[in-house]
Image (tube, rainbow, N blue to C red):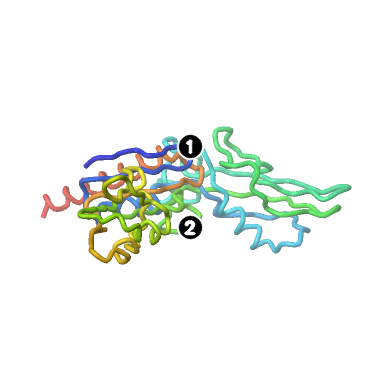
Amino acid sequence: MEVDLLELSDRSARFILSGVDASFANGLRRAMLADVPTLAIEEVGIYNNTSVLYDEQIGLRLALIPIATNYDEFVPHTECSCEDGCPACSVTFTLSVEAEDEDRMVYSGDLVSSDPKVSPADSSIPIVLLKPGQKLVLEATATMGFGHDHARWQAGVACGYKNLPVIEIHDCDRCGACVKACPRSLITLDADSAKVAADDVLKCSLCKLCADACDINAINVSEDVNSFIFTMESDGSYSAQQLIINAVSTIKEKASRLNKILEEL
């Protein structure tokens, strides 16, 4: 297995994964979406809400606020020895905001954590707009869980992949039909033949319009079944790099657990 990193930022990554089959690639995608645990607000106690939103709507918005922390210090609630939540698997947030003389937007940054090492991944996520005289006072409990149980715990977003395109051009007569047909303008003409730059191959959508436009079948567009172009984003609860590493670790742990079970049969 080989990994060729194309782009990497704090919250997104793009890389080529080679030497694996589709089942492993999809397993990695699913692990990033559903098997890496995160903290998310699960229970909300609202003491005063005079905003235009119902209590349930406030709760739904709070549940989808990504929470960042050092996740090595927490365990999933389902694996914790407590029953009702404890500092090992949960964190409490409070929020108290009142609009006085002018409109006041309540943001995720207004949430005050009981643990200084835990906070919303973004402080500027809007929750509700308060008009003068309106207030919102609540207490919320965030627990650690998995995306396969609920979307609130889904750390990976926009995680997807496609097979690596393979474009072969031979015996080209330079008619230019493929150049006009390509919707992404990836094909150019040189002195001898049509060509696609190595970097531009990654942008190919595998539509095969260029091959259809060629009357002499000089272009063949296929896909490498053992190489995949991955694109992924993190919601901010993990960095993109850490999310990928944790997803791979999860797959490795599950494989080891399965191997142990099989050995005991």
Residue 153, image x, y percentages? 47, 52
Q: Nearer the viewer, residue 213 or 221?
A: 213
Image point 51% across, 40% down: which residue?
87
Return the x and y of residue 251 as percentages of the image width and height: 28, 47
How many numbered dots are placed on residues in this image? Answer: 2
Lower sequence index among marks 2 and 1:
1
Q: Residue 220: horizontal and vertical position, in percent?
A: 24, 59
Residue farthest right in this picture: 101
Determine which residue is flagged by label 1: 10
Identify which amino acid the numbered label 1 is placed on.
Asp
Write the residue at 72% across / 48% down: 106
When the figure is inspected, residue 49 is found, relative to residue 6, above or below; the finding is below
- On residue 41, the disc is none
Q: Split into 4 quadrants, where in the image is the C terminus?
A: bottom left
Label 1, secondary structure: give it: loop
Q: Quarter of the image containing the N terminus?
A: top left
From the image, tell me which residue sits under label 2: 151
